[in-house]
Image (cartoon, rainbow, N blue to C red):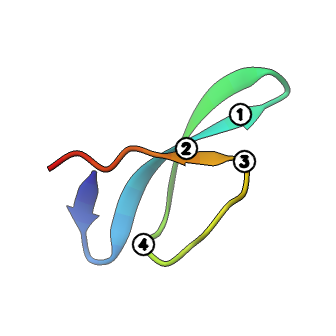
Amino acid sequence: MNLGDGLKLETELLDGKTKLILSPYEHKSKISVKADLL
């Protein structure tokens, strides 16, 4: 989901829990799940 200004909403698993994080659009995390909704 693009939030504008090069930011996207990402979900990241942390300690077995789902954590919502805001990260730069070009950020690539191996353990993050991109929620690209158009």
Q: Which residue is mark 4?
A: 25
Residue placed at 24% from the left, 59% from the top? Answer: 3
Q: CA distance from mark 3 to mark 2?
A: 7 Å
Camera-near label (1 vs 3) is 3
Secondary element under disc 2, as helix, strand or loop, is strand
State the image quarter where residue 29 is shown. bottom right
N-terminal label among 1 and 3: 1
The type of residue carrying mark 2 is Val
| Mark 2 vs 4: CB contact within 8 A | no
The type of residue carrying mark 3 is Ile
Q: Which residue is mark 3?
A: 31
Secondary element under disc 1, as helix, strand or loop, is strand
Camera-near label (3 vs 4) is 3
Camera-near label (2 vs 1) is 2
Mark 4, residues whose alpha carbon is within 10 Å: few (<14), some, or many (≥20)? some
The type of residue carrying mark 4 is Tyr
Above or below: residue 24 compared with residue 12: below
| Mark 3 vs 4: CB contact within 8 A | no
Q: Image check: 30 left or right of 19?
A: right
| Mark 1 vs 3: CB contact within 8 A | yes
Residue placed at 36% from the left, 67% from the top? Answer: 7
The type of residue carrying mark 1 is Leu
Q: Which residue is mark 2?
A: 33
